[in-house]
Image (cartoon, grey):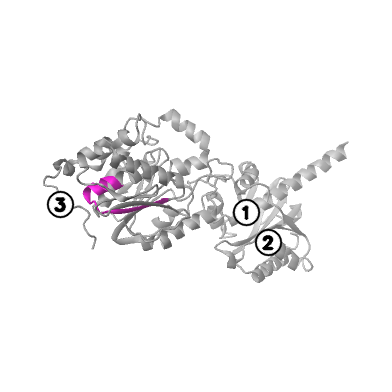
């Protein structure tokens, strides 16, 4: 049974020792409260009066009341989600129930400290003290990461990589658990698998034990990857999903049990045109690029049709081409042993017929070192003309080559150039030019899953097939260039 989150007037009078209660409290919605305190936390910036702010507040009121206990909010950056959720919501919640306890976490320490400071600014302001100071008074705990009130309520912050001990919360909030940044500091969907898995472990294992009975959990974030925390929890039952893309997509219109429905009706209608007009959104899309814009602005990390590799680009063959017309065949291996995590061992056979590239075969499975060696032997027996075996030069690759080089010839250890996205971009023109040929599903039923993973890159949980594919196509590209140089030399 969910315990009530709202004190009635008599409870508040008894709890605070006040003879009179500010009757206005019961009249003020969270949205009204935000407008009152906005000049305190955002001086010089006008309050953004828009329906999406109302949607945030309505859902958070339902959380405070215990009507929603699991909530995911996906919105573009810059839409005041953090200031609404992590700054205003807990203080408004204290006005309803002063002993309420909150824990806030995310990927960035700076954001947690920023929100903590702004929340404390509200409580310390003359506006708050004059209206509600008799209900909520600052407690003894008053530090950068945590503060409390005299009724036992507290606001505590942590990070996904940090720990929190000794505290349990009525409401837990996770604000952007993964950073959409790469090593160079540019926006990108290339979120590390470790970052994704760490956020899920933190939410499922660490924070679960810090929730009081009947408590609520909120995740607010922009989507970066199909396997991110939002994607993970939305596979479960019981999460309310408030999903508001920058540009309205009728096929993905959001409804929740509040009840709520996205009020927009026209395709591409903007979320908040007074703040993000058409020119600004167009500029954002240009700066982010198509893939990042789909994820961060549209909350769609795997849009229909593909991202880097589009579903409309490859050709399909229904019978294998004559191997006499194929100038070169290669095997391409991406090896992660099953003892090392959730990734797969992937081996592919590709062939070059003039400038066209044919995918002939694939092995994809979770394999041990011994089983990986056996798989390479089997692929070699099945495709004896695939003389060149490309293996990424990792610890696994070196061990495999050392073990098999006296049994099977033709190994080439490959040192990847650039990151996964850079390698994908390097072979994207081959796809776009219509030079990639894939077996039809009637020939190879696994090609459907193959296309789903490859066209979903970089938003998919797994990208082992992409690694093997790009490794083969980059090598065959260099093969073609070398062939062209020899032809030009012969022309002299």
Question: Closest to the observer: 12 or 63?
Answer: 12
Q: Position of residue 464 (x, y in %)?
A: 59, 57
Q: Position of residue 382 (x, y in %)?
A: 70, 65
Task: Tell me which residue sits at (52%, 39%) in the image.
Answer: 290
- Pointer 1: what residue? 467
* Local crowd size for mark 2, using a 10 Å CA cut-off: few (<14), some (14–19), many (≥20): few
Task: Tell me which residue sits at (52%, 41%) in the image.
Answer: 187
Quick check: is 380 in the magenta stretch? no
Report the span colored magenta: 90-105
- Pointer 2: what residue? 395
Q: Assign a secondary structure to mark 2.
A: helix
Q: Assign a secondary structure to mark 1.
A: helix
Q: Position of residue 171 (x, y in %)?
A: 32, 54
- Pointer 3: what residue? 8
Separation of residues labelled 1 and 2 (CA atoms): 16 Å
Q: Is residue 51 rendered to the left or right of residue 180?
A: left
């Amino acid at each position: 049974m969910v315990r009530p989150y709202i004190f009635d007037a008599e409870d508040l009078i008894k709890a605070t020792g006040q003879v009179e209660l500010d009757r206005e409290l019961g009249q003020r919605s969270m949205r009204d409260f935000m407008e009152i305190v906005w000049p305190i936390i955002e001086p010089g910036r006008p309050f953004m009066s828009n329906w999406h702010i109302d949607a945030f507040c309505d859902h958070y009121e339902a959380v405070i009341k215990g009507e929603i206990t699991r909530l995911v909010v996906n919105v573009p950056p810059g839409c005041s989600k953090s200031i609404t959720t992590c700054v205003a919501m807990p203080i408004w919640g204290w006005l309803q129930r002063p002993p309420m306890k909150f824990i806030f976490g995310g990927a960035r320490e700076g954001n947690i400290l920023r929100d903590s400071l702004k929340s404390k600014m509200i409580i310390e302001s003359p506006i708050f003290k004059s209206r509600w100071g008799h209900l909520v008074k600052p407690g003894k705990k008053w530090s950068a990461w945590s503060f409390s009130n005299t009724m036992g309520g507290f606001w505590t912050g942590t990070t996904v990589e940090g720990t929190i001990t000794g505290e349990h919360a009525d409401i837990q909030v996770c604000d952007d658990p993964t950073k959409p940044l790469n090593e160079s500091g540019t926006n990108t969907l290339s979120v590390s698998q470790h970052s994704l898995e760490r956020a899920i472990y933190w939410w499922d294992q660490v924070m679960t034990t810090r929730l009081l009975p009947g408590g609520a959990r909120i995740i607010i974030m922009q989507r970066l990857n199909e396997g991110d925390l939002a994607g993970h929890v939305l596979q479960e039952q019981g999460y309310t999903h408030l999903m508001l893309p920058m540009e309205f997509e009728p096929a993905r219109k959001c409804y929740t049990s509040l009840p709520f429905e996205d009020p927009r009706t026209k395709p591409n209608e903007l979320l908040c045109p007074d703040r993000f007009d058409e020119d600004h959104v167009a500029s954002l899309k240009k700066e982010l690029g198509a893939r990042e814009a789909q994820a961060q602005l549209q909350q769609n990390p795997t849009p229909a049709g593909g991202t880097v590799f589009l579903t409309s680009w490859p050709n399909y063959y229904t019978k294998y081409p004559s191997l006499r017309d194929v100038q070169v065949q290669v095997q391409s291996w991406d090896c992660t042993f099953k003892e090392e995590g959730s990734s797969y061992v992937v081996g592919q056979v590709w062939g070059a017929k003039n400038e066209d590239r044919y995918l002939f075969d694939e092995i994809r499975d979770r394999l041990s070192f011994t089983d990986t060696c056996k798989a390479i032997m089997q692929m070699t027996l099945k495709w004896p003309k695939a003389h060149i075996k490309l293996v990424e030069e990792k610890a696994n690759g070196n061990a495999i080559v050392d073990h098999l080089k006296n049994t099977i010839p033709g190994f080439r250890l490959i040192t990847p150039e650039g990151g996964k996205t850079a390698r994908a971009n390097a072979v994207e023109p081959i796809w776009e030019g219509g030079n990639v040929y894939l077996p039809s599903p009637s020939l190879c039923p696994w090609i459907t899953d193959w296309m789903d993973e490859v066209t979903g890159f970089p938003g998919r949980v797994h990208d082992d097939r992409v690694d093997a594919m790009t490794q083969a196509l980059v090598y065959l590209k260099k093969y073609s260039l070398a062939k062209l140089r020899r032809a030009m030399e012969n022309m002299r």
